[in-house]
Image: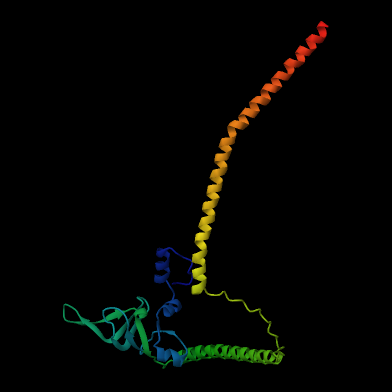
């Protein structure tokens, strides 16, 4: 709000506001200009002066428009012509408004110093616009040669005819006809018969093995008895030789 914005203590801010010198108070009395004035004069805000026509934008008297009759730098307030109220004793007094709630509609240019300020602000804005325009034009000029270079670089490419590879034709599977279906139905029972024969052969083999089992057992028993008998016979022969 004041010169040094680093101060965060509200008490110090108020002290600087109340004890501010005249040149700072004059700046704090600034109000925004209307869109038409801002476009023609080249300034967004200006301090309110006596003789300026002003419209109230906020507060109880919103929409009221009138000339500034008095500017109070000590209280930071302005007074407009026609904006009054009646006291209890019947006297009329002006209602004060803060300049931040106001929009300047027309300027009082009787003061030559104020004219110089506006001219200086307008002159300071023009070069900035000219520089921006120059930058834009240079960018466009730079872009156009690049496009030309791209067009030059792009040359017609020779397209070589590619021979189409002969793909072997896939043999389509023959769809099942009525004859093939009948043949399949006839062949199926034959398969069943073979499976039945196999089962019967397997059963016969099992029965034959079962029958042969006792004979095999008898043979094994005989072999064991012969093995047991052979050592006894050898022992008898050895004893006979000893007696002799």
Whether residue 99 sits left or right of residue 223 in the image: it is left
Which residue is most to the right? 244
Point out the image quarter for the C terminus: top right
Residue lying at 32% horizontally and 86% vertically, measured from the top left: 55
Which residue is most to the top? 243
Q: Position of residue 214 (x, y in %)?
A: 58, 31
Depth check, front residue: 83 or 195: 195
Image-quadrant location for residue 159: bottom right
Q: Position of residue 173 (x, y in %)?
A: 57, 74
Depth check, front residue: 196 or 151: 196
User: Count the marks: how many?
Assistant: 0
Image-quadrant location for residue 21: bottom left
Q: Position of residue 105 (x, y in %)?
A: 36, 89
Q: Is residue 40 above or below residue 59?
A: below
Its colouring scheme is rainbow
Residue lying at 58% horizontally and 38% vertically, measured from the top left: 209
Residue lying at 49% horizontally and 65% vertically, measured from the top left: 185
Depth check, front residue: 86 or 231: 231
Image-quadrant location for residue 40: bottom left
Whether residue 142 sits left or right of residue 108 in the image: it is right
Q: Is residue 103 above or below residue 220?
A: below
Depth check, front residue: 222 or 111: 222
Point out the image quarter for the N terminus: bottom left
Whether residue 224 sits left or right of residue 2 in the image: it is right
Whether residue 73 sits left or right of residue 195 in the image: it is left
Q: Is residue 107 above or below residue 203?
A: below
Residue lying at 52% horizontally and 68% vertically, measured from the top left: 183
């Amino acid at each position: 709000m004041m010169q040094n914005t680093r101060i965060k203590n509200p008490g110090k801010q108020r002290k600087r506001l109340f004890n501010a010198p005249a040149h700072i108070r004059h700046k704090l009395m600034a109000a925004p200009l209307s869109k038409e004035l801002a476009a023609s004069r080249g300034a967004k805000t200006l301090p309110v002066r006596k003789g300026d026509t002003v419209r109230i934008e906020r507060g109880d008297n919103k929409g009221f428009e009138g000339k500034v009759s008095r500017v109070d730098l000590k209280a930071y307030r302005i007074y407009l012509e026609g904006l009054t109220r009646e006291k209890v004793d019947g006297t009329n007094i002006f209602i004060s408004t803060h300049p931040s709630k106001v929009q300047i509609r027309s300027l009082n240019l009787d003061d030559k110093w104020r004219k110089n300020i506006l001219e200086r602000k307008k002159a300071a804005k023009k070069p900035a616009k000219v520089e921006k325009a120059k930058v834009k034009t240079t960018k466009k000029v730079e872009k156009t040669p690049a496009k030309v270079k791209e067009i030059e670089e792009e040359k017609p490419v020779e397209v070589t005819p590619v021979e189409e590879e002969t793909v072997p034709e896939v043999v389509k599977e023959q769809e099942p006809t009525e004859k093939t279906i009948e043949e399949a139905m006839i062949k199926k029972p034959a398969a069943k018969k073979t499976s039945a024969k196999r089962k019967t052969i397997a059963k016969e083999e099992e029965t034959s093995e079962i029958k042969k089992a006792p004979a095999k057992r008898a043979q094994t028993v005989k072999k064991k008895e012969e093995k047991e008998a052979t050592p006894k016979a050898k022992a008898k022969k050895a004893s006979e030789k000893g007696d002799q």
